[in-house]
Each structure stands twice: as C-alpha cells, then as structure tokens.
Amino acid sequence: MYMNYMDYVNDNCMNMFTVGQVTKMQSILNTSRSAILTSDGCSGSNVVIIDAQPLQILAPTGASCLTTFTPSVKFRNNGNGNITALQFTFGTVGSSDSLTFIYNGTLAPGATINLTSSNVFTRPAGSYTFFARVRNVNGANDNNLANNYLTGPFTVGNASTAAIPFFDGFESNNFPTNYTIIPSNADSTWKVTNTAKKTGIYSLFINYYDYTVRGAKDEFILPSFNLSSINNPILVFDRAYAQYTFPGSGTISDTLEVWVENGCGTGFQRVYRKFGNTLDTDTATQSFFKPTSASQWESDTINLSAYAGNLVNIKFRGINRFANNLYLENINVKGIQQLVSNKIL
Ligand SMILES: [Ca+2]
Ligand SMILES: [Ca+2]
C-alpha cells in the first residue's frame, strides 16, 4: 500500500491514511491534544505582543541656556498586552554617561505615558542629539525591536559665552562688542569715559546730571556666562555715585539695578537695587559729580549661587531721576571657594 503516508516510500503518490491511523489521530485530538479543537491560534488574536515605543522626546528639546536637564519622554504601548515594567536608557549620542530609567506602573495596550526621569544630566554649551532606547519590557526583550530607539536634537546656549573669571575695567576704551546696550533713547546712555576711574584710566558712566526723561531706563547686558565651570559664582563691581541736593530741600537719587536671567529667554529677575543712601558713595552735591579718588568708590558683591551650573545673562539697569552721575568699574564674574552662613569669605 504505497499510497499510505506511513509507507515512507519515496513517492509523490502518497495520499491517504489507513482507517486505523485515522482512528488513532482522532483519538489523540479528542484526548491529550483536545485544546487544538478550540484554539484560535491561527487567527493570531491571542498571541501576546509586547511592544513599547518611545514616541516623543518632551525634554530636552530646542535651545536652552540651562546646562542641566531632566529628560522626559512619551512612550506608547504598541502591543496587545499590559506593560508592567519598562526599562529604558537615555543620554546624548556619543557620550558614555547614559542613565537608566525604570517604570513599574501598568500601561494598557494603546495607552501612552510621559515618563520624566528622576535623574538629571548636564552638558556644557554645544549641540547634541538626545536619545531614548527601550532596554527591556516586562523583564525581557520586547517583541518589536525596530521602534525602540528615538533621537532628537537640542542645543545648550544660544550665545557665545565669555570666559570665567571675567573682568572688565573698561581699559579698552570701548564698550566691548560682546555687550548688548539697550538705551532708553531718551538721552545719553551708558558709555566709556576717561574722566573718572577707580583703576587704570577708564570707567563706565551715565550722565544723570543732564538727563531729560524721568524714569527712563538705560541697560547693558554682559556677555553670557556658563557658570558650570566654577563654584559659588559671584558678581563683583565698583560703583561711584553722589545724589543731587537742592539747597535746603533734601536730596534726590537715581537708581541702579542688576538683573539676572537664568537661561536663554526665561526672563530677567532683579537681584540688586540701590538708590539714595544705599547707592551713594560720596556726599550729595549740586555740582556735576565726578569721582577723583579711589576712596569715592565702593564695591558690591552679588551672590549668584542660585544660578550655579547654568548659563546666565547679567543686565545692569540705570533709572533716571534727574539726580547725579553714576559710574561703574571693574565688573568681575568669578567663583569663590566657599560660602559660610550666606556670607562670602
Ligand atoms: Ca518596541
Ligand atoms: Ca578702569
């Protein structure tokens, strides 16, 4: 009976089973392999597919002056089974200090979740490619490795930064080109002068003795600084100022402020404001004030530790009140060794 499959003959004509073989197969199907009778395995509907996908990088993206990042990535469960454990790594392409994030919640099929790392990483100014990579899902490789890797560009800093320690005594006899002057357009604004100095020949000056618009604000912004390279950053500068006095009717004062922006485009916050007796360094006068000795200058120190590690922009602002001349000198951004009880040693 060469047509019998179980004849094992090398013949293309095998096309039947014996009656006994059929009986045996049906018996097995009805007993030890009975699950096959009700399985819908061929339709694929009960094949569990575990598939996590990084869908979108929420942070870091775009341009930032901040050098410290808290990564946040949107994931989707592309499979048909719950995700109960998701491990992924993140970092920047080409760097070895990638970090691992583990999610232990439950993400249902089709659902998305924004996962924000509790670990941060830092990068100095430059351009980078952030990546997020699925490592394993529910304790094993996920079933679709092709969608496990997502990248996106971001940059740190949108301006060139000045070297630290930074010092400017204005001895170049010019407003440095990496400063930004924001004049009020009401009158003369900040300029370099050789008529007064604390050290050298030159200082910075605004003529509030002859100034016409009350409340006008004249500003200049120092070049950007990356404070990640120093500990306990401070801003130090010298100022010279005298109030204007009317005979017998008291004094009037202009105002000096310093503002700091923690990162590009985040907005400046005021960290210093002086006027009147806190601003002046010499006796009020009805004359055009011009310091002629170093003793007519005072030094200010502003603690920038709240901005440590980040890129910052520092802005000086003068506000006119028709009083008297204001001079600045020896602007210095640097780090110091330690702070004790918030006092600078
Ligand atoms: Ca996947
Ligand atoms: Ca000088």
Image: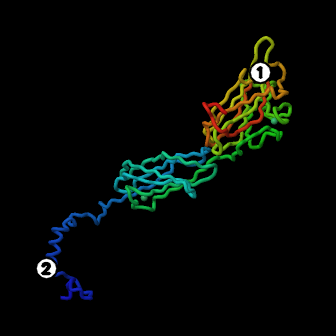
Is residue 192 at all visible to an observer of this figure? Answer: no
Going by the numbered disc 1, the residue's amino acid type is Gln
Is residue 193 at all visible to an observer of this figure? Answer: yes
Count of marks, rendered view = 2
Image-based side of 170 in relation to 15, left or right:
right
Disc 2: which residue: 20
Residue at 67 percent across and 43 percent down: it is: 225
Q: Quadrant of the C terminus?
A: top right
Q: In which quarter of the image is residue 266?
A: top right
The percent position of residue 287, horizontal first and vertical second, equals: 84, 20
**In the structure shown, which secondary structural element does the residue marked by tag 1 occupy?**
loop
**In the structure shown, which secondary structural element does the residue marked by tag 2 occupy?**
helix
The percent position of residue 176, horizontal first and vertical second, equals: 78, 41
What's the CA distance linking mark 2 and mark 1? 118 Å
The percent position of residue 101, horizontal first and vertical second, equals: 46, 51
Image-based side of 212 in relation to 50, left or right:
right
For ligand 2, the image quadrant comes to top right
Vertical arrangement, residue 183 with respect to residue 152, above or below = above
| Label at residue 243 | 1
Going by the numbered disc 2, the residue's amino acid type is Gly
Residue at 73 percent across and 38 percent down: it is: 332
